[in-house]
Image: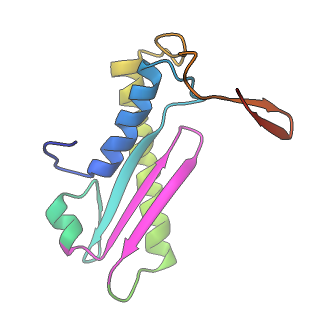
Amino acid sequence: NVAASSGSTSMASVCAASLALHDCGVPLRAPVAGASVGLSGSTLLTDPTGTEDHFGSMDCKVAGTERGITAAQVDVKGDGVSLEVLGEAFGRATTARREILGHMDSCVLNGDREPRRPRSSDAPFLLVDDDDVVEAP
C-alpha cells in the first residue's frame, strides 16, 4: 500500500517491485522504472499530481528499462490528443524513466545489477534455449 503520494502510485509500484525482486534474489536482466506524463490544457506535466491527473485530458504511464519500454498505458478524456502530443509525452516519460533508473542505481543498487542474495529453490524461473522456452520444474 502507498500511504501518501504527490505523483503516480502505480509508477512508484513498478519501481518498488523491481527493487524488491532484486532484493529477494530474483535475477532480472535490468531494473525497471516507470514515469507518468499528463496533459493539462495544452501543457504536458511530468509526474502529475492527483488533482492534475483528475482534471487533465490525458494520463500516459510508461514503464521500462534503460533499453526500452516494456509497458504503457494511456488514458484520454474528451476529443483525444494528437500523435505529436502523444510522441512528446512518450519522450518525456523516457527521459523521466531514465532519470529514475539512475537514482535507483546510485542510491539503492549501487551499480550492482546482480541480486543481493541467491535465488530461492522455491522461486519460479525459466530456462531459455534459443527459440524454445522450457518451464523449470
In this view, which residue lies farthest toward the top? 117
Q: Position of residue 114 (x, y in %)?
A: 54, 15
Q: In this picture, which residue range is highlighted in magenta?
A: 55-77
121 above or below 92? above
Query: Which sits in the foreground, 93 or 14?
Result: 14
Q: Position of residue 33 (x, y in %)?
A: 43, 40
In this view, which residue lies farthest toward the bottom? 79
The answer to which quarter of the image holds residue 80 is: bottom left
- Main secondary structure type of the part rendered in magenta: strand
73 above or below 113? below
57 above or below 62? below
By what rule are the colours in the image chosen?
rainbow
Question: Which residue is drawn at the image coordinates 55% and 21% (left, top)?
Answer: 122
The answer to which quarter of the image holds residue 16 is: top left
Tell me the quarter of the image containing the N terminus: top left
In this view, which residue lies farthest toward the front? 137
Magenta span contains residue 58 = yes
Query: Which sits in the foreground, 6 or 118?
Result: 118
Q: Is residue 24 left or right of residue 40?
A: right
Q: How many marks?
A: 0
Question: Which residue is drawn at the image coordinates 47% and 56% (left, top)?
Answer: 91
Magenta span contains residue 9 = no
Q: Position of residue 62 (x, y in %)?
A: 45, 54
Q: Is residue 120 left or right of residue 24?
A: right
Tell me the quarter of the image containing the C terminus: top right
Question: Which residue is drawn at the image coordinates 32% and 81% (left, top)?
Answer: 77
